[in-house]
Amino acid sequence: MKAVATVCLLIAIDYTASLADTVQLAGEQAVLSAYKRMEEADRKGDGQLWLALRDRKTIDSMDASLKEAIRKGGHSRPHVEYTPMAVRVSDSRAIVLGKVADPDGGTVQYDAVLLVVEEGLWKVSREQLSEKPFDPFLLYAMLEPADGAFAAQNAPWKGIPYVAVNTEMVRKEDLNWKIQATFDQSFAYVRFEAAVPLPAPGAKVTPEIGRLGKTGGPPAPPPLRLKVLQPPLDTGSYSFAVSSLVSTTEVPGGKGKTNTRYTVTYSLYVKNAAGQQVFESTLGDGSSSRMLGVHDRFIEVRIPLGGLGVPSAAIPKIDLEEADSVMLVLPYHVEQFGARE
């Protein structure tokens, strides 16, 4: 009887796995179908189809006159070809990295298309064009994985060791930032800790300081590099840097004049091993970011492991080092969250 039950259980497990694979495949096929309909709208100059493929948020943000102009149709490109190069599907969101070639116009562009499910259909939520192919990192930066164990416990940094200072280059007390790092099944997390409170994202800056491009906070933390070794292959490295900037906005003033408002923003920049910038995310001035957080004395960065080339469920070896040649901090081995427990 036990043998029969075991066989039934194995069949059930195998059927469940096959069903999951079928659902995922159907999701990818539906996403690619929506991507090819973008090609159809472009070939025909079909403005109504173009609008029908966009999500409500995109449509609602468009000016009424612009929507009407698109609806009437536009320039057709009958031989344009949309070629998907990579696709990633996660629940009700997906991303396609593709190539758009128009032989008639002699143009080639690359696009990154973020899609969402609305009323059972895949709709375009965001589209980004480039003259160069997008780095695969974007598959996970634009479509982040679910929170891992570390984020689920509200980032408990206590007990995670700090990066050691290179005392041959700088005194410990002269370094503006203390650095910690860890990782879980979804992200690598890095936290910069300042000695003084940081200006909050979106905080106003006085015109006297703003005109100088200063936020009132400490100098930017050092750019860092995450090096991943996933046996048996070295998946390479990505570097990242965080900077604080002053954003300017013209606001109505008295007697028909305008005033300049200065506010604090923070930006995260990610570069690949070749030194090419592959991703940027901004926090503040109406912008939000899931990969960058600033509060109290801390700047917190999280980098998706999939974007670093780490396969799902793998436990990689990750090292952290300074990206510049100055070497203010020493190389640091990043421990998996919970490894010391």
Image: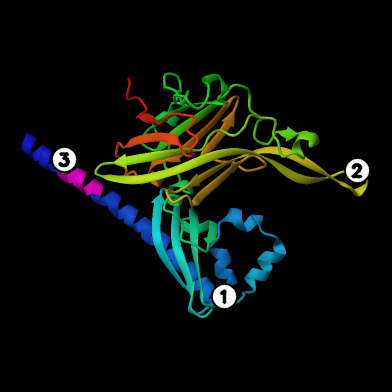
Report x, y in % for residue 7.
11, 42
Looking at the image, do the residues carrying marks 2 and 3 touch, with CB atoms under 8 Å apart? no
Estimate the spatial distance between the alpha carbons at disc 3 and disc 1, rounded to whole Å. 54 Å
Q: Mark 3 points at which residue?
A: 9
**Left or right relative to 332: residue 191:** right
> Which of 30/134 is in front?
134
State the residue lying farthest toward the front: 168
Residue 314: name its quadrant: top left
Amino acid type, mark 2: Gly
Category of crowding for the residue at label 1, using alpha-carbon neighbours closer than 10 angstroms: few (below 14), some (14–19), many (at least 20): many
**Left or right relative to 204: residue 293:** left
Disc marking residue 45: 1
Quadrant location of the C terminus in the rendered image: top left
Report x, y in % for residue 60.
64, 55
Foreground mark, 3 or 1, reads: 1
Q: Is mark 3 on a helix, strand or loop?
A: helix
> Which of 137/12 is in front?
137
Amino acid type, mark 1: Gly
Q: Residue, x 47% and y 47% (percent of image)? A: 141
Q: Magenta-highlighted stretch: main secondary structure?
A: helix
Amino acid type, mark 3: Leu
When the figure is inspected, residue 269 is found, relative to residue 195, above or below; the finding is below
Bounds of the magenta segment: 10-17
Q: Residue, x 55% and y 69% (percent of image)? A: 49
Residue 256 sits inside the magenta stretch: no
Foreground mark, 2 or 3, reads: 2
Report x, y in % for residue 186.
39, 38
